[in-house]
Image: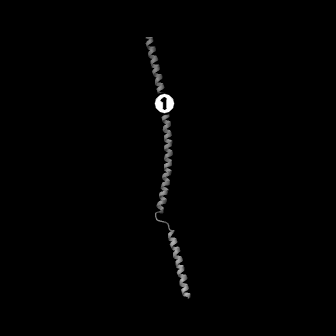
Amino acid sequence: MKLIRLQIVTAAGFAVLAAFAGAAHGQTARSGGGANAQLTQQMQQLASERTTLQAENARMKKELDDLRKERDTLKKGQQAAEGRAKAVEAALARNTRRST
C-alpha cells in the first residue's frame, strides 16, 4: 500500500512539474519580437526626422517669403528711381531746348 501511495504521489509530482514546464515554455520570447522592436524604433526615428524636416521647411518658406518682400521693395525703389531719372532727363531736355 505504501508503494502505491508513493507511485501516486510521484505521478502527481510529475504532473505538476509537467504543468509548470508547459507554462514556462509558453512564456518564452517569441521569435521575431526583436524585429518588431526594431521597426518601432525606426518608425520613431522617421517621425523625429519628419518633424525636423517640417520645421526646416517652414523656416525656409518664411525666409523665402521675407526675401520676396525685400525683392518687391527693391523693385519699387528701382522703378521710382527710374521714374525720377526720366523726369530729370525730360526737364533737362526742355531746359536745353529753351536755352538754344
Image coordinates for residue 9, horizontal then vertical, percent: 55, 82
Q: How many marks?
A: 1
Position above or below: 17 against 43: below
Task: Determine whether 88 is above or below 37 in the image.
Answer: above
Judged left or right of residue 6, residue 82 is left
In depth, the one of 91 and 69 nearer the eye is: 69
Residue drawn at (49%, 46%) of the image: 54
Give the answer, above or below, for where 94 lies relative to 63. above
Give how far across and how far down residue 24 sits, in percent: 52, 71
Q: Which of the 4 image quarters holds residue 8?
A: bottom right
Tell me where residue 5 appears, x and y as whole percent: 55, 85
Residue beneath disc 1 = 74
Q: Quadrant of the C terminus?
A: top left
Mark 1: amino acid: Leu
Q: Position of residue 13 (x, y in %)?
A: 54, 79
Q: State the residue at coordinates (54%, 80%).
A: 12
In the depicted structure, whether residue 58 falls above or below residue 18: above
